[in-house]
Amino acid sequence: LEPQREEEAEASGETAPEESDAVSDEDDEPSAVAEGPVEITAESMEYGLETRRLAYYDNVVMSQSGRRMTCQDAVATLREGGGMETMNCVGQARIEDNVAGRTVSGDEALYRVAASEMTFRGNPVVMTGEDGERIEGATLVYDLSTGAARVERATGPAPAPAGIDHGPDTEDDGEGDG
């Protein structure tokens, strides 16, 4: 069966998180990521029954638990028993994470549901925070459960670790205070 594309119709759907997604491996507490259903809207969609893939076209918006992901087009791969396994977003991929107070944007993003992480790629990928922080790089892996990010080929100032004040002169000649 070939998937068929509906033109000129708004497509939307909700998927409830799998029970295994709603519980953290570490402490059996509910994860901030998997609370509530995922709602996805787009101008059109196609579903491949045999491939277990949903393709969303034009103005894709995915919302769940204080987070909003947007992109031009997306393909979701579904698990055998139901629920989403991955979503690959292309064209102006962006997440507004109101839980962690951060926004990440890039050319494309891959959301791995079980890992609760998104890998953004772009030229550049940009992450901004409520406190004005801004980090850019070629690739950024964003952990939705903690708000932590790992950046490859990063540019921009990195915040100093808490409790360390380097002051205006951060050079250290290795000879102490002399």
Image (spheres, rainbow, N blue to C red):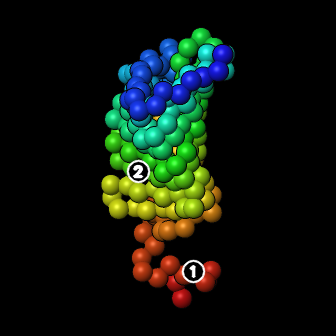
Mark nearer the viewer, 2 or 1? 2
159 over 91 or under it: above or below: below
**At which x and y percent is residue 153?**
63, 63
Q: Nearer the viewer, residue 124 or 90?
A: 90
**At which x and y percent is residue 108?**
56, 48
**At which x and y percent is residue 94?**
45, 47
The residue under label 2 is 103
Q: Residue 49 vs residue 22: left or right?
A: right
The residue under label 1 is 172
156 over 58 or under it: above or below: below
Q: Type of residue at label 1? A: Asp
Q: Residue 67 vs residue 173: left or right?
A: left
Q: Type of residue at label 2? A: Thr
Dot 2 alpha-carbon crowd within 10 angstroms: few under 14, some 14 to 19, many 20 or more? some
User: What residue is rendered at 33% in x and 58% in y?
Assistant: 131
Q: Which of marks 2 and 1 is nearer the N terminus?
A: 2
Total number of numbered labels? 2
Identify the image quadrant of residue 165: bottom left
Q: Which mark is drawn over residue 99?
A: none
Q: Is mark 2 on a helix, strand or loop?
A: strand
Q: What element carries label 1?
A: loop
Q: Would residue 147 be seen by someone viewing this image from the given angle? A: no
Q: Which of 65 and 100 is in front in this view?
A: 65
49 over 152 or under it: above or below: above
Residue furthest top in the image: 81
**At which x and y percent is residue 16?**
44, 17
Identify the image quadrant of residue 4: top right
User: What residue is rendered at 48% in x and 44% in y?
Assistant: 72
User: What residue is rendered at 46% in x and 82% in y?
Assistant: 169
Q: Nearer the viewer, residue 152 or 88?
A: 88
